[in-house]
Amino acid sequence: MVVGIKDSIKLISISVITVCAVFVCTLFLSYNTDIVSIRDEIVSEQGRILYDAQVMTGKVVSAVSGGCLAITSVIMLIFYIKNYVDTHSKELGVLKALGYSDLSVAKHFWVFGLSVFLGCLIGYMAGFFYLPRFYEVQNNTGYLPDFKVHFHIIILFTLVVVPTVFFAIISILYAYHKLKTPVLDLIREKRDIKVNKNKKNDNEDKDISFLEDLRASTLRGRKTLVFLIGFGTFCFSAMTQMSMSMDELSSRTMAVMMVSIGLILAFVTLFLALSSVVSANAKTIAMMRVFGYEDSALNKAILGGYRPIAYIGFAIGSVYQYVLLKIMVDIVFADLEEMPEYNFDFKALAISLVMFIIAYEVIMQSYANKLRRVSVKSIMLEN
């Protein structure tokens, strides 16, 4: 067995993301499916307006949250598989040398889909058991007749079975692509090195210090990690600010749900990204310390480059949540009475920004301490 079930357990971050995605989709897709049963019973104009708005909201939220989180999960899955192939390249190269084909080795990577199955199943079950409360919150205006929760096998199949099969296939195909590397390159642990054809001339290179070049190359060589850090801060910004508006626009329950999902996604992605940054640069860090570089310089070169990305992600999240809520209030719920006008909440922005700065800098400091614990001896004894 090339890949074991224990290896799939390491993909707990993907399980967490799929829990959040499937939980939200279960709520809104089930609500949209069941609300059809009372359509003919709605006689008031406000009831029909609310009905159309609720259906549109369910479609938008399911598409946006499900789509974004699915893309993120695919990127994280590819990141994990690439990391697995790189760290086990010798064993995989030996298998290919013994005559195993790329496909016969790659097919064992289906087990990475188990993390998706676990997350989808937990997310669906949590969402299904929360449906009665969710229906009560959605119908608290009194404009719509009451209706009961029903089990829909098609939703279970769509949110649990389909993603599991899809991610298992993605795992096999990407592993097959990575295993096309020549056998000797795998055994020698040779990495693909892309040459920059637009490389600056020597005079320009002399103007860039070693630490500045290291900082830039760390970002260029870790594009997936750049995305994860940006996405994590995006989730923190969008969800915390959006949740502060939910008390006025929707309900406290929705606010708690939004901020909980946002914080979970933010800290999971940041943990994965920053821990990978430290492990990927362990040898460089240890050798730089031997040559006399101070810890502050190492932190600035290795971790400091991600700080602008984090703040850009926060800014995009602020704009995103405002545009989304503005569309929902001014377009989807425009004809509904008692719907308050929504404007950009600068107080929520200030509170979220302060929370973000404190949380992010605490996390960065903890990983800076981890950098200081990387020793040359531990690196030399790795192999």
Image (spheres, rainbow, N blue to C red):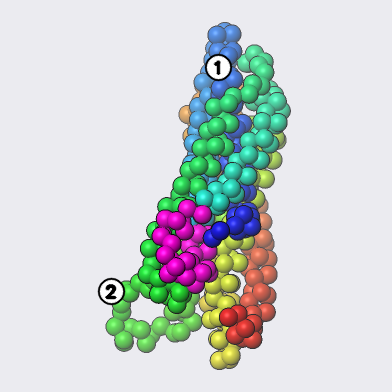
Residue 207 placement, left or right of 244:
left
258 in relation to 249, above or below: below
Disc nearer the start of the sequence (2/1): 1
**Residue sitting farthest toward the front:** 98
**Residue 64 in view (yes/no):** yes
Mark seen at residue 197: 2
What residue is shown at x 46% (from left), y 84% (from top)? 210
Measured as percent of width and height from the top left, residue 261 is found at 64, 45
Q: Are marks 2 and 1 in contact (CB under 8 Å)?
A: no
310 in relation to 34, above or below: below
From which residue to which does the magenta span run? 80-109
Residue 299: image quadrant is: bottom right
Measured as percent of width and height from the top left, residue 38 is found at 59, 13
Mark seen at residue 36: 1
* Three-letter amino acid code at the position of disc 1: Val
Measured as percent of width and height from the top left, residue 253 is found at 70, 35
Residue 266: image quadrant is: bottom right
What residue is shown at x 38% (from left), y 63% (from top)? 180
What residue is shown at x 60% (from left), y 41% (from top)? 120
Q: Quadrant of the N terminus?
A: bottom right
Crowd around label 2: few <14 · some 14–19 · many ≥20 (10 Å): few
